Image: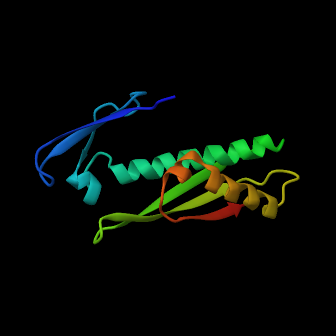
């Protein structure tokens, strides 16, 4: 299986602009620029897309791990907070903030164990070489 995306850029770093399109076309010539990456411009940026991909992948991985154990998942919501060091121009890490509804018969310790396994087993987590932290709110 292959997944593709396309990026086009024209111009200088600060004054130029670009567009990103994904294979599914959910992003279709979505604009990105210096301002959307480092200020408050309208559009997206690579770091935001990495965070979105990680949040989506991890949340699905939690659901899959629960399902594999015969447990029906409830509501799962993840915020992925990507830490971009502007001085070094590098991603320092990603923090996952998972909020989950309580599942009958599953205690908090068991749920957190499943979430930790999903954190390390998620396809996007495996692709990243930065520290990944996790906090779980199970209520």
Q: Give the x, y percent position of residue 8.
A: 22, 37
**Looking at the image, which is closer to me, 70 or 103?**
70
**Looking at the image, which is closer to me, 7 or 135?**
7
**Which residue is drawn at the image coordinates 80% and 64% (left, top)?**
109
Is residue 68 shown left or right of residue 63? Answer: right
Vertical comparison of 40 with 32: above or below: below
Q: Is residue 84 visible?
A: yes
Vertical comparison of 13 with 20: above or below: below
Q: Tell me how many marks there are.
A: 0
**Which residue is drawn at the image coordinates 51% and 65% (left, top)?**
131
Instruction: Name the residue furthest right.
Output: 105
Instruction: Name the residue furthest bottom.
Output: 87
> Which quadrant does the C terminus fall into?
bottom right
**For residue 18, which quarter of the picture?**
top left
Q: Give the x, y percent position of residue 27.
A: 37, 34
Q: Give the x, y percent position of residue 138.
A: 72, 60
Is residue 23 shown left or right of residue 69? Answer: left
Q: Is residue 39 visible?
A: no
**For residue 137, which quarter of the picture?**
bottom right
Q: Give the x, y percent position of residue 116.
A: 68, 59
Vertical comparison of 130 with 78: above or below: below
**Which residue is drawn at the image coordinates 55% and 45% (left, top)?**
56
């Amino acid at each position: 299986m292959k997944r593709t995306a396309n990026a086009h850029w024209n111009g200088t770093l600060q004054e130029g602009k670009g567009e990103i399109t994904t294979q599914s076309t959910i992003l279709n010539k979505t604009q990105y620029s210096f301002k959307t990456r480092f200020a408050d411009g309208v559009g997206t940026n690579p770091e935001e897309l990495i965070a979105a991909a990680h949040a989506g992948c991890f949340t699905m991985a939690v659901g899959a791990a629960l399902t594999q154990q015969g447990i029906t998942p409830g509501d799962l919501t993840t915020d992925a907070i990507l830490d971009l060091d502007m001085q070094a121009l590098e991603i320092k890490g990603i923090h996952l903030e998972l909020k989950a509804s309580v599942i009958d018969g599953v205690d908090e310790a068991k749920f957190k164990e499943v979430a930790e396994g999903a954190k390390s087993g998620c396809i996007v987590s495996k692709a990243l070489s930065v520290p990944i932290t996790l906090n779980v709110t199970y209520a």
